[in-house]
Amino acid sequence: MNLMREVNVGIVGLGNVGSGTLAILAENAGQIALKLGFRLRVAAVCSRSVDSKPIPESLGPIFKTTDWRELVAHPEVDIVAELVGGATVAREIIEGAIAHHKSVVTANKELMAVCGSEIWDRAIRAGINLAMEASVAGGIPIHAVLREGISGDRVVALYGILNGTSNYILTEMEKHGAALADVLAEAQRLGYAEADPSADIDGLDARSKLAILSALAFGEKITPADIFVEGIRRISPMDFQYAHQLGHTIRLLCAARQTPDGLILSVRPGLIPRSTILAGVLGAYNAVWVKGHYGQDTFYYGRGAGPAPTGVAVVSDLMRVAREIRSGSPERVSPFAHERLGEYRPVSVLVQKRAYYLRFRVDDRPGIIARLGGILAAKHISLEAVLQLPCDTKHDLPFVITVEPTSEKAIREAVEEMAHLDFLREPPLALPMEPPL
Amino acid sequence: MNLMREVNVGIVGLGNVGSGTLAILAENAGQIALKLGFRLRVAAVCSRSVDSKPIPESLGPIFKTTDWRELVAHPEVDIVAELVGGATVAREIIEGAIAHHKSVVTANKELMAVCGSEIWDRAIRAGINLAMEASVAGGIPIHAVLREGISGDRVVALYGILNGTSNYILTEMEKHGAALADVLAEAQRLGYAEADPSADIDGLDARSKLAILSALAFGEKITPADIFVEGIRRISPMDFQYAHQLGHTIRLLCAARQTPDGLILSVRPGLIPRSTILAGVLGAYNAVWVKGHYGQDTFYYGRGAGPAPTGVAVVSDLMRVAREIRSGSPERVSPFAHERLGEYRPVSVLVQKRAYYLRFRVDDRPGIIARLGGILAAKHISLEAVLQLPCDTKHDLPFVITVEPTSEKAIREAVEEMAHLDFLREPPLALPMEPPL
């Protein structure tokens, strides 16, 4: 390879992220070359509607195609950026690129969460590099941090706010006391939330991201199906009022914790102390808290999505992979930080001990607390406090019981038993209370 | 080179950081090998009192010496970790290692701030790698972030809390209303602060760190002497009371901002809004806020110092450099993110426009506000608010004037003129008020 020549990039997918990437490669070309010591050139782009896509003129002549097979086979392309998303065609594109011995940069969380380890095995065999910074928390370089920045540490826990839409919804509910449905409708109107909001508010998007980050942090093959998930649909404005009374707030928290038996993984709404820096993550921002055995607490914060922040992640990956190509490096850095991922032995969230927040809506009558307290006592759960904010109705009266740390199993059994009580308007809402992070 | 063999490390300096590094290399050896795919072996250590230093047994046989020349010349040593600190012997060690074509990892902020660019030039010519993650904000992998994680972005501003001791002092003053001298004495008693506290409280340590980070972020040769510095000696508990009234707090803020004329660099105490996530950085923690042209706001937080967090930075650097050595890579990643640093054209802090907080201590009498207001008006500075907290004395009466954004030059001229007024107990304290970050 001629060490003086530039490294050539082919981009498949010119949607939001693809266009953002192209814009940065064009506008920031000078600084990129200063950093690399050589030019990163866009040699080819592919999109189903490539002719209608604006391509910055400063990029010079570019091979345009509507067929990704032409792009991955193009002799000038050294690195393929797969920015199509989804798990079907994207997989073909990545595997096609690998088959042509092209390195790959991807922003694809669905695919990498489900079969990233398999794709990495293929990449190793083909001797190419694979990078996926943009797949999780677009604006936060959390892959670089876990893969290299703190690679000498041993991660013992990782907490994340990884879905911007649900965090936006929760923090709007908190600020304005609005109902979830109203905030969601407004977010959909503004284009922040999808018409089908399930991936965001049921925690599925966050779960894919946690699968990737915990594979990186702990070196185990973790797929989304391994992770307990619960969405935010049941959170209401009054829960924020009660949480505030308790010095807490509520966030959709992705958590991965090392225990003596293995990793416990969950994506679920939970109470976190308002004094923790994680509670300051508002709106569509993302954040990751890493607890290292040696380095202790570190915290990373930035935009979770958007063409430009995600484009930065793609371009930074392209630069790193271009360096590897230029150096003719036979050793590559695993996108999962570990050369090979170990098998994950799932540890059920049921064994985890936490304090819990139990919120009830009841038709008021004498003996309710005695009845609920009896059920908790039978499960050996100690009541910590009973909290009732002023309310002018006896029907549909909310109140909260907090309990001392107990297992998720005991809480679920208690909640299930309570669900049949005729004075309850709806099954109790049980949320874990996280210790100060 | 035999690709199957381990990469060998030699450590010079077994003080806090050196011992922390050695402990991690010993205890975490298994995970390090899993991540790298090969072993990172400690082949040699050097310390003036090497025989009295505890060396973890699991490291196996190690060459021990009191003479760093023997260590850098040792044929088995591939990477030299310089953990001695200071700018004299440390420089000889690094240059000695480079002369022997050994790669270098260093935690040395003084040295890298003053002549890092020169040392990097030498490293390039010798074809070795140089890494310095541990030199700034030990526990935060901010070098990895700027060098690779967000390398595709163009940094437009960088703010940091980079001196743990002064942040500890300020946040203790804020929490307990204690005087700086008392908090400092307590910190010295506990061993958090040096007997000569100047490097910490006069901002000199933070200035070295800002010089390194801004060279990395902006690709220019920046030395500490280029940076305006002002320490925290004049901050008193009442300043926190007034700042809180204004919705702000006070921190020793390192700032580097791109302007059309060039970079403005400063280390100085300033008011920051309490709502900003930077205001939540308490005690000895460090934090860095980066504003990217594309990726916008990202924020990084962690321990600033300590043997284990700094040890993680050193070990992570060793792992990265070991990968480069294993790959026989002819291209290296610059520790300054840029292949070559450009010349820095200093832009004076005098041209910068900010709102200002002016705190006075006066012997009360009629006409004071008129007099001060007259001086401000003559400099075309618009008064924003006058604030006086309840106080039961007419002698040594504190109050605060805030003014609308104006140049540092105008404020300095006004303050200088005010300093001669006979009703002032001390010269006015002028602190810039940062806009929400």
Image (cartoon, coloured by chain):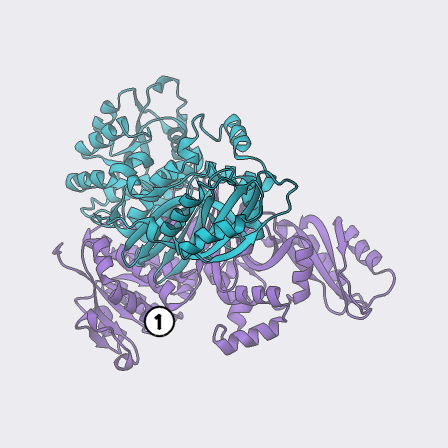
Chain colours: A cyan, B purple
Provide residue A225's location: percent of width, then percent of height: 29, 39
Provide residue A163's location: percent of width, then percent of height: 43, 39
Give whichever of A74, B95 is nearer the camera.
A74
Give whichever of A383, B291 is nearer the camera.
A383
Q: Residues within 10 Å of mark 1 (few under 14, many from 20)?
A: many
Q: Quadrant of the N terminus of chain B?
A: bottom left
The chain containing the residue under callout 1 comes to B
Residue name at image x 17 percent, y 71 percent: B60
Give the quarter of the image for residue B231: bottom right
Give whichever of A78, A412 is nearer the camera.
A412
Residue name at image x 22 percent, y 26 percent: A74
- When the figure is inspected, residue A142 is found, relative to residue B164, above or below; the finding is above
Which residue is outermost to the front?
Answer: A366
Give the quarter of the image for residue B23: bottom left
Give whichever of A35, A315 is nearer the camera.
A315
Q: Amino acid at mark 1?
A: Val
Residue name at image x 51 percent, y 76 percent: B188
Provide residue A289's location: percent of width, then percent of height: 41, 52
Q: Is residue B179 left or right of residue B46?
A: right
Q: Which residue is mark 1?
A: B84
- When the figure is inspected, residue B349 is found, relative to residue B427, above or below; the finding is above
Indicate the secondary structure of the residue bearing disc 1. loop
